[in-house]
Image: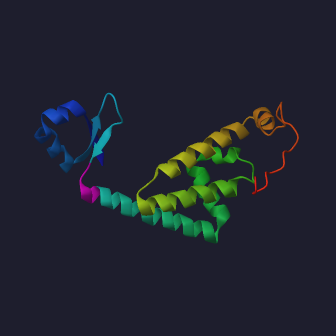
Amino acid sequence: MSTRTVPYSAFLRGPSQVLPSLDSADVILERRDDEDLVLMRAERFEAGAASLRIAARALAIVARRNSSLAEDVLAEELPWLTWLPDTERPACVSELLNHLIAGADTGELLPFARALTAWRSTAVVWSDPELARELQGPFPGDGPEVPRPSESS
């Protein structure tokens, strides 16, 4: 499916000029002072949402039955996974899949996007051994362990 980009102000001045584009494309409404908006036919939106749910659940089934295959599949799409230590990769795959499945089911994909960004940033840190070593501590100013306060305080 193609997209067509239109200034938001042009849409406000003449929606009848923009709406026919929805027959063959989704429309991105560019706004100067805020995030862009997307207009699309409900049928296309529902098709995309249903497809995402099926793909997320299918990948989750693969991950449960063969975790190394799921890691390999995700590593092809997310090549930065190779920078994560072997001990971190399963946690990354599991967390991303859980967020993806929940997001596909609810339509709320921002937690998945945030987790993806966080894991990618973590992988970038691991790609630099010196930086990874520095960030594991100890840190200047680390003092003795402080006991947890009692509940009666």
Q: For residue 104, what is the image quadrant? A: bottom left
Say whether residue 62 is left or right of residue 68. Answer: left
Which is nearer the eye, 13 or 3? 13
Residue situated in front as seen by the camera: 33 or 40: 33
Image-quadrant location for residue 73: bottom right
Can residue 72 be seen at all in this image of the molecule? no
Q: Residue 19 appears in which quarter of the rendering?
A: top left
> In the image, residue 141 lies at what x, y percent?
83, 31
- Report the number of numbered marks: 0
Residue at the image position 56 percent from the left and 70 percent from the top:
61
User: At 31% across and 28% down in the image, what residue appears?
Assistant: 32
Q: Is residue 149 above or below residue 120?
A: below
Apparent side of residue 114 relative to residue 143 in the rendered image (left or right): left
> Residue, x 47% and y 58% (percent of image)?
103
Main secondary-structure element of the magenta-colored stretch? helix
Residues shaded magenta = 40-44
Can you give x and y, in whole percent of width and height, for residue 82 in the image?
A: 68, 47
In the displayed orientation, state which residue is furthest to the front: 152
Query: Residue 134, percent across and down?
Result: 80, 34
Q: Tell me, yes or no, if residue 32 can be seen here.
A: yes
Q: Is residue 34 magenta?
A: no
Up-down: is 74 above or below 136? below
The relative height of residue 125 versus residue 52 in the rendered view (above or below) is: above
